[in-house]
Image: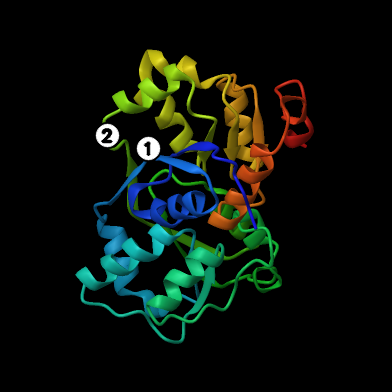
Amino acid sequence: MIDLNEYRVLVTRPEEQAGHFLDMIESSNGSAVNFPTIAIAASPLTDKAKQQLKDLSQVNIAIFVSVNAVEYGLKALKSLKRSFPETLIVAAVGPSTAEALAANDIQIDIIPDDNFSSEGLLNTPELEEIAGENILIFRGQYGRELLSVQLTKRHANVDSVECYQRVIPEFDVKPVVKELKAGSIQAVTVTSATGLTNLFEMLGKDNELLLDIPFVVASRRIAEVCENFEIKRISVADNAGDKAMLEAVSELANQTEEDYLTEEDEDYLE
């Protein structure tokens, strides 16, 4: 059983997604500070996106890149009085996304075995021979282009519907700044590069208080962004799921300072 030894953790997940992770920290003898650095909102649909959703029966494979893509993609369909075709092949980037689809009675056909990311999805055998297939990606505004670029290189016909957007939430930063100045925050968890960037923007001139605190991040890509912000101690979880993030926090909570990954260590960038 995980014991965090009263480790105090700043959690930056979006408010609506943080509850379970906050509970897991508290249940593991840790102390959680809720500080969402991303808010999710519906994105206005372009005329092209509306037409794509109306013509969803012409699509062969639908890819959902996140839980938010499921929620807001299905809401967009509902607003157009369209239902999700039962014959459509569905791909989910990871277990949380798959659970969200299953909760809406949508069968998942493609999911990575372990690397729950765009890279992992691209490595699934079902997406190797896709020449001529019509693929629609449900994603957020300004999301990664990796899936679209690589699937197009495999000669698929790829389009995207940007059904949600990430914004900086209105959240009182004063209590967090007070804790940072007191040195009571012992780790920060971050599951997206946007969340990390927003964290520094929300704290303004006080963001320098973060630089000596260990960060637990959900991917090597986010670790690279951490380096740009001159964060000195970084631990990379296996994925962005609550379980993997908690395990990484636990490892950190039970390490000595000499065990931390520092900016001089480049293994995490390989």
| The one of 50 and 74 positioned closer to us in this rendering | 74
Q: How is the image coloured?
A: rainbow
Which residue is at the far bottom? Answer: 87
Label 1 packing within 10 angstroms: few (<14), some (14-19), many (20+) = many
The quadrant of the picture occupied by the N terminus is: bottom right
Rendered image quadrant of residue 46:
bottom left
Tell me residue 159's x, y (percent). Answer: 45, 60
User: Is 120 rendered above or below residue 202?
Assistant: below
Tell me residue 150's x, y (percent). Answer: 62, 54
Give the side of residue 183 with respect to residue 77, left or right: right
Tell me residue 78's x, y (percent). Answer: 24, 72
Label 2 packing within 10 angstroms: few (<14), some (14-19), many (20+) = few
Q: Is residue 250 visible?
A: yes
| First in sequence: mark 2 vs mark 1 | 1
The quadrant of the picture occupied by the C terminus is: top right
User: Is 182 rendered above or below residue 44?
Assistant: above
Q: Please report the residue visible at 58 percent of the width from the left and 72 percent of the height from the top.
A: 132
Residues at circles 2 and 1 in contact by the CB criterion of under 8 Å: yes
Q: Say which element carries label 1.
A: loop
- Which residue is labeled 2 in the image? 171
| The one of 254 and 139 positioned closer to us in this rendering | 254
Q: Is residue 135 visible?
A: no
Q: CA distance from mark 2 to mark 1?
A: 8 Å
> Amino acid under label 2?
Phe
Mark linked to residue 35: 1
Rendered image quadrant of residue 122:
bottom right
> Amino acid under label 1?
Phe
Tell me residue 82's x, y (percent). Answer: 26, 77
Q: Say which element carries label 2.
A: loop
Give the side of residue 166 with respect to residue 11, left or right: left
